[in-house]
Image (spheres, rainbow, N blue to C red):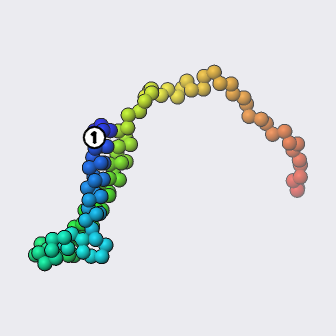
Amino acid sequence: MSYTAFIILILIVAVALVLIVMVQNPKGGGLSSSFGGGGAQSLGGVQNTNNFLDRTTWTLAIAMFALILLSNVAIPRGGDNDVNLNNTLEGIETTAPIENTLPSTNDSIN
């Protein structure tokens, strides 16, 4: 999949997530109260509607997280893709490590 397709999917999931969160009511009303209360009871009741909205919210959030991580793989990278690490230190002078110049002592106990 291309990067553009991931961006479009992320935007669709984001809009759906915003709509699902906006439909929810933290006081327990939510979607069931918008159907007139009594009519929603025949559709499964308040508890089933809240469970559906809660599961949908988590599913969309996990889907968005996964799409964002997967889109990182599809990002078009500029530059040379064939990196050759064998030639990276050409022309750079290196020096030997400095040897220990501290005098050694014979403080051992026999």
Is 107 rendered above or below residue 95? below
Q: Position of residue 99 (x, y in %)?
A: 79, 36
Q: Quadrant of residue 17 in the image?
A: bottom left
Q: Along the line of sight, which residue is nearer the eye, 56 or 42?
A: 42
Q: Give the number of marks.
A: 1
x 37%, y 38%: residue: 75
Q: Is residue 107 left or right of residue 8?
A: right
Please state the horizontal and vertical placement of residue 15, each as a whole percent of the image.
28, 53
Q: Which residue is mark 1?
A: 5
Mark 1 is surrounded, within 10 Å at the Cα level, by few (under 14), some (14 to 19) or many (20 or more) other residues, namely few
Residue shown at 88% from the left, 56% from the top: 109
- Specify whether 18 is left or right of 43: right
Task: Residue type at mark 1: give it.
Answer: Ala
Q: Quadrant of the C terminus?
A: bottom right
The residue sitting at 30% across, 53% down in the picture is 14
Give left or right: position of 109 versus 65: right
Please tell me whether mark 1 sits on a helix, a strand or a loop.
helix
Q: Position of residue 96 (x, y in %)?
A: 73, 30
Residue 70 in view, yes or no: yes
Residue 19 vs residue 9, the one in the foreground: 19
Q: Is residue 41 visible?
A: no
Q: Looking at the rendering, which quadrant does residue 78 occupy?
A: top left
Between 78 and 45, the one nearer to me in the picture: 45
Q: Residue at x 41, y 33 (%)?
A: 77
Q: Give the left or right position of residue 38, taking residue 66 as reference.
A: left
Location of residue 69 in the rendering, given as x and y in whole percent from the top left corner: 37, 48
Q: Quadrant of the N terminus?
A: top left
